[in-house]
Image (cartoon, helix red, strand yellow):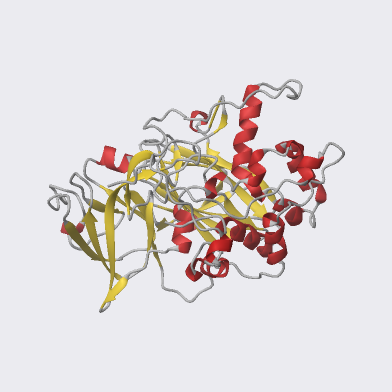
């Protein structure tokens, strides 16, 4: 049964109560960074301290700053949302928070739209905002001053003391790092025991949870990572009240009875039953797994996830980090990895880093992904490398069922919008929503590590 969002949950222990900042040693900041492959931590402690100090660093953006703005206190801990908290009503129409009361001191020429639009971005940045001073000042102090002015830091607004929206809800990207899906071994076979569940899920921290479905109680399901030639076995236990099936999208099966299509290659998996799929990872690339039974409803409600098969190689990697980016457009509106802006995790990078983004469209509409300020080098389609047909673009249309791999080389600092360019999917009268994220390019590896640490310290994994 899904968690009832109307029943209060017990708050997580505070750092003082737990003695371990509310996390086991496996979820320590050091463990998080090691798992994420973040290196070069000189100076991180100072940056994190700036984000988590009892009093935030002063906003230094000119005479307009108020005393209150200079003493805003970002909190270091957060009461986590339920690990399977739900969201928005099942509609493709944007669902947004009510507009805040109009400030009598509203800037000339502004309307309530401007106030609402700014508030959404304030929620996105949250209490990371003060840390940006220590990050950007060594490069150019004017960057932080302008950001503080844009956000209206002098207002000492409430979001300065709250975690970013994306740290308050369950995130597949963070869960994949903190609690990676790990198989057991049966001889030379990697065995995954997985569940198919009814859950509640939050599109963002302010919307009511929605009844959804998930693998291992997650939407999207945990990312499955394998290497070419690896023998795989998946035991899926159906905890739903209805039948289902699991299809590994893009896999070239030797035995077609493993293809996961009820009444074509198997009988449906009935409630309470465990069904086993077994095959060898035969090709590399960005693949997916999802329901192929009552699929409009079941995939639309969350039965989807990323499946990545890599080469076994000792060569230097072609990129430094990667993001799985699964889009959907059914339950909860327009989502990236099960969330709408401002609860979408930014793509973090440092100057000089090469970032691979794996676009996976599990929805029913084409979405043209547009990155501001940078080109995307398109290196693979549907998991197949393009070779001499690779190309550059800043807008890439991804059709339902397609996967595209792009490499972004971050060579300039800043916060750059990254969104679907079908405008009704991203922006309305209440500001940005839905299929919006950012590419956040920080000056150094240490700066990226500091931001990752600050987010990890406020996040509770599933």
Q: Residue 103 occupies which quadrant of the picture?
A: top right
Closer to us: 262 or 333: 333
Q: Residue 17 occupies which quadrant of the picture?
A: bottom right
* Residue 175 rendering spot, x and y as whole percentages: 45, 58
* Residue 57 rendering spot, x and y as whole percentages: 77, 52
Residue 62 visible (yes or no): yes
* Residue 111 rendering spot, x and y as whole percentages: 67, 21
**Which residue occupies 66% across, 69% down?**
41
**Which residue occupies 70% across, 38% down?**
151
Closer to us: 44 or 229: 44
Instruction: Report the label total.
Output: 0
Taking the image as shown, residue 118 lies to the left or right of residue 188, namely right
**Which residue occupies 65% across, 53% down?**
441
Closer to us: 453 or 244: 453
Closer to us: 150 or 353: 150
Residue 146 visible (yes or no): no
In the image, residue 93 sits, relative to residue 82, either above or below, namely: above
**Which residue occupies 57% across, 59% down?**
457
Taking the image as shown, residue 295 lies to the left or right of residue 425, namely left
* Residue 13 rendering spot, x and y as whole percentages: 51, 58
Taking the image as shown, residue 137 lies to the left or right of residue 169, namely right
Taking the image as shown, residue 252 lies to the left or right of residue 221, namely left
In the image, residue 159 sits, relative to residue 96, either above or below, namely: below
Instruction: Single out the residue that lies furthest toward the front.
Output: 17
Quadrant containing the C terminus in the rendered view: bottom left
Instruction: Single out the residue that lies furthest toward the bottom.
Output: 187
């Amino acid at each position: 049964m899904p968690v009832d969002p109307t029943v209060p949950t017990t708050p997580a222990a505070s750092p003082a109560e737990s003695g371990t900042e509310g996390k086991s040693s496996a979820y320590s900041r050091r463990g998080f960074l090691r798992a994420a492959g973040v290196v070069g931590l000189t100076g991180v402690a100072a940056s994190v301290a700036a984000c988590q100090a009892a009093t935030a660093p002063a906003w230094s953006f000119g005479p307009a700053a108020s005393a209150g703005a200079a003493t805003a206190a970002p909190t270091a801990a957060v009461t986590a949302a339920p690990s399977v908290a739900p969201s928005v009503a099942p509609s493709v129409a944007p669902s947004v928070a009510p507009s805040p009361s109009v400030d009598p001191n509203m800037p000339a020429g502004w309307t309530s739209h401007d106030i609402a639009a700014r508030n959404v971005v304030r929620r996105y940045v949250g209490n990371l905002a003060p840390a940006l001073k220590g990050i950007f000042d060594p490069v150019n102090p004017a960057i932080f001053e302008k950001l503080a002015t844009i956000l209206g830091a002098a207002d000492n607004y409430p979001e300065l003391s709250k975690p970013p929206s994306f740290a308050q809800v369950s995130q597949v990207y963070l869960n994949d790092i903190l609690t990676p899906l790990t198989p057991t071994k049966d001889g030379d076979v990697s065995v995954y025991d997985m569940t198919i569940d009814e859950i509640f899920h939050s599109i963002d921290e302010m919307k009511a949870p929605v009844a959804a479905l998930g693998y291992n109680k997650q939407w999207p399901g945990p990312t499955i990572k394998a290497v070419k030639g690896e023998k795989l076995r998946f035991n899926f236990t159906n905890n739903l009240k209805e039948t289902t099936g699991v299809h590994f999208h893009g896999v070239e099966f030797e035995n077609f009875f493993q293809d996961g299509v009820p009444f074509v290659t198997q009988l449906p998996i009935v409630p309470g039953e465990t069904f086993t799929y077994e095959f060898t990872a035969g090709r590399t690339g960005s693949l997916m797994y999802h329901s192929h039974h009552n699929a409009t409803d079941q995939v639309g409600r969350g039965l989807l996830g990323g499946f990545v098969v890599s080469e076994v190689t000792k060569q230097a990697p072609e990129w430094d980090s990667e993001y799985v980016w699964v889009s959907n457009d059914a339950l909860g509106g327009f989502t990236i990895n099960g969330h709408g802006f401002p609860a979408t995790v930014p793509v973090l990078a440092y100057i000089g880093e090469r970032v691979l983004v794996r676009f996976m469209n599990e929805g029913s509409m084409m979405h043209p992904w547009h990155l501001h300020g940078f080109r995307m080098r398109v290196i693979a389609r549907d998991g197949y490398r393009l070779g001499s047909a690779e190309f550059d673009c800043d807008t890439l249309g991804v059709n339902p069922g397609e996967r595209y791999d792009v490499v972004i080389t971050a060579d300039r600092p800043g916060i750059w919008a990254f969104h679907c360019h079908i405008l009704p999917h991203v922006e309305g009268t209440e500001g940005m929503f839905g299929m919006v994220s950012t590419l956040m390019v920080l000056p150094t590896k240490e700066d990226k590590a500091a931001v990752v640490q600050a987010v990890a310290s406020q996040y509770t994994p599933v």
